[in-house]
Amino acid sequence: MTAVWVLAGAALGLLAVLADAPDGVLRAVMAALTSSGLAWGLAAFLAGRSTAGRRAAVLRATGTLVAATLAYYLLIVFVSRRWSGGTLEDGSSADAYALRSVALMTGFWLAGSLVAGPLLGLLGHTVRASSPRSAAGAAGVACGLLSAEGWAAVAPWRLPLGDPFYQAVAAGTAVRIVLPLAVLGWLAGRHRLWAAWPVLAGAAVAAGAGGAVLWRVLLASVNA
């Protein structure tokens, strides 16, 4: 069964590459659904939730993220080749530098997969196999973390939504926030967690706020 989730992760990596093809709002929405912390984190969480065994939950979730990462960057290197063709200031090829950047990013996100995979896998397992109170806490934490990327992208000022660029930004951000809330509602109904709604809501808010801060730090580190 773990192999199924590995294949699902590889398919997610392929979809993430394909999401670069459209433009505007469609591209932003497709990226949010296939090439984001929300999309990959949700896949890992569901992989963990798919089994009652803790070890299997960790392996499935981690395997999903590792497969998605490898598929994504291998397709970039050998198929889309969007790293190639650049030039330096002196007119020489920038391909070596671009490949080095791709290699560094691959290693960075693989390391992230080895950290996030077990965490999300165990959260998914807890929702499935634990008491309602523990399951509510795990569901809240998971959905708070999944929405954190969206909250981190929310601008503290009013966006000029008449501009197509900002329309795309707003659409992608909305998907990253609304979809985790929908997942939280589905989990609460599916596992009868509404009786523990204070735990559910508190965990979601705390994880969302903390995760948003971590996303800002992470993006600043990557850009640096």
Image (cartoon, grey):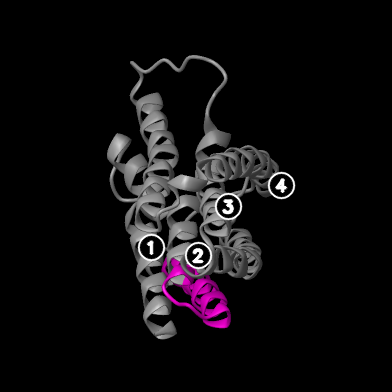
- Please give the residue where the numbered disc 4 appears in the rendered image: 221
Q: Quote the CA–CA distance across marks 3 and 2.
A: 11 Å
Question: What amino acid type is highlighted by mark number 4?
Answer: Ser
- Nearer mark to the viewer, of 4 and 1: 4
The magenta segment: 48-77
- Whether the residues at callouts 1 and 2 have beta carbons within 8 Å, the answer is no
Q: Locate residue 182: give its quadrant.
A: top left
Q: Residues within 10 Å of mark 3 (few under 14, many from 20)?
A: many
N-terminal label among 4 and 1: 1
N-terminal label among 1 and 2: 1
Residue 137's disc number: 3
Name the residue located 64 percent from the left edge and 48 percent from the top edge.
90
- Nearer mark to the viewer, of 4 and 3: 3
Question: Is 54 a magenta residue?
Answer: yes
Q: Locate residue 13: give its quadrant.
A: bottom left
Question: What amino acid type is highlighted by mark number 2?
Answer: Gly
Q: Quote the CA–CA distance across marks 4 and 3.
A: 30 Å
Residue 80's disc number: 1
Question: Is 83 a magenta residue?
Answer: no
x, y percent for residue 190: 35, 57
SS assignment at label 4: helix
Q: Residues within 10 Å of mark 4 (few under 14, many from 20)?
A: few
Question: What amino acid type is highlighted by mark number 1?
Answer: Ser
Q: Quote the CA–CA distance across marks 1 and 2.
A: 34 Å
N-terminal label among 4 and 3: 3
Name the residue located 53 percent from the left edge and 45 percent from the top edge.
200
x, y percent for residue 75: 41, 69
SS assignment at label 3: helix
N-terminal label among 3 and 2: 2
- Please give the residue where the numbered disc 2 appears in the rendered image: 124
- Nearer mark to the viewer, of 3 and 2: 3
Q: Residue furthest front?
A: 195
